[in-house]
Amino acid sequence: MAKMKYSIFSLLRQARDYHRGWPKAWRSPEPKPSYDVIIIGGGGHGLATAYYLAKEHGITNVAVLEKGWLGGGNTGRNTTIVRSNYLWDESAHLYEHSLKLFEGLSQDLNYNVMFSQRGVINLAHNEHDLKELSRRGHACRLNGIDYEMISAEQIKQIAPIINISKNIRYPVLGGSIQRRAGNARHDAVAWGYARRADEFGIDIIQNCEVTGIDIENGRVTGVQTTRGPIKARKIGAVPAGHATVVGNMAGLTLPVESHPLQAMVSEPIKPVLDTVIMSNTVHVYISQSDKGELVLGAGIDGFNSYAQRGSLDVIEHQLEALCDLYPIVKRLRIMRTWGGIVDTCPDASPIVSKTPVEGFYMNCGWGTGGFKATPGSGWVFAHTIAQDRPHRLNEAFDLKRFETGFLIDEHGAAAVAH
Amino acid sequence: MLLIECPHCGPREQTEFTCGGEGHIVRPDPATATDAEWGHYLFMRKNPKGLHYERWFHAHGCRQWFHAARSTVTHEIFAIYGIDEPPPAIDANKAGSR
């Protein structure tokens, strides 16, 4: 397939020819009978894994199997926030590695992922919030991650639409900012990885649902799919909300539970906010897209669900907080709401791990905050699969930690309560 | 949003309730359980796609716990039963396991 380097010159050339000459960004191949590695799940994490398998480890006989379309799950449903201000060393290093990969991602992929380091502010509404944020800040700075505590007045300067009056139910007492954090175009991350993986000869197979995993003598041999059986020496599963379903196929029980998480956008308005502001306590986070929509994240429903839709009371609760904090949005209409299924872990940290089944690897449990980790997750997972052992960045995120008790409790740093 | 039939108060809105997660988890004897068994008890969950036997708490009502058998795909509630009752048999196909 003709490879095309995207640049200002290719854009001009195509413009001259009325944009009729753009080649497809990736092929739609038929599945081959066997591969060295099969990745289950064609979201951002799965595609990133495939890309880094080829780029970092020279493994290109790889297929990515996706039951729907690329990036149609949580990759296309999140609120696109990228940050690395986590409390524990293990998470801080993993998420910071991911943020650093994001910083060079558009160049690396030759695909504009529109990574915008507009800063992420976390609000404190009570004394405990202030202490928690400042504790997390000290931890971050010890790990070399930029993090500053800022006052309510400084927040008001950065985001004039915020209400810092003392007379609201949960007044803003201050907050923290990570200036290198920001957001990125979520679809572009999936598409950029897909295009580059495809250039390495990796087969990306959509509309191909895995229905079973073949295991002989404790070792994987292949998968059963809706498009027939495919053999593989190694299988990496990145199934997000369906982690348990895929894990069960390999005989695994996992500590994850699936919940609906909702988000929404308002009608587009003129630019009013050039940063990301999150509040864990009143539970709302907000940014403004390039189109002008306010992008708003809500919470999860308390019950288990695979339905990709959540309850209205969750949205109501979140919009109440929003109107209190940003009074100018009160008369805006909400244009779209949607839900995704997140796989939450008891310690709000992911599992990127080998499993008791030889040649079968799991990457799941990212819960409500997987998008920011897309490059880092793929990078360490590719290492885990290629070398058959975890990288030092992900060895703590082993499935075994639920036996040993070495949990990585990030409930404070996760934006959404698990 | 669900309409939940509290066994004590009748049908009420879901916002009055708290979901207590998977039901019928048996606590092993901490004196004899291995680390693996204890970890399994604390953290491992069935998380089925389809029929789920789960606990609910009528937090803003009678403050009683009870069980529900519900589909995690359609959210349909098939049965409500007492906190000390065993799970009723329900056709998993009906619950939309796939």
Image (cartoon, coloured by chain):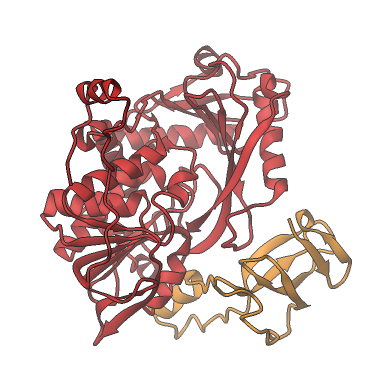
Chain colours: A red, B orange
Q: Nearer the viewer, residue B61 or B68?
A: B68
Question: Quarter of the image holding residue A295?
Answer: top right
Question: Quarter of the image holding residue A12?
Answer: top left
> Visible in this render: residue A86?
no
Determine the residue positioned at 49% across, 80% down. Answer: B30
Judge left or right: residue A168 versus residue B60.
left
Q: Is residue A202 above or below residue A361?
A: above
Q: Is residue A42 above or below residue A237?
A: above
Q: How many marks?
A: 0
Determine the residue positioned at 56% across, 62% down. Answer: A306
Q: Nearer the viewer, residue A192 or A139?
A: A192
> Visible in this render: residue A297?
yes
Determine the residue positioned at 50% across, 45% down. Answer: A77
Image coords of residue A168 (percent x, y): 72, 24
Q: Nearer the viewer, residue B20 or A243?
A: A243
Determine the residue positioned at 69% across, 86% down. Answer: B86
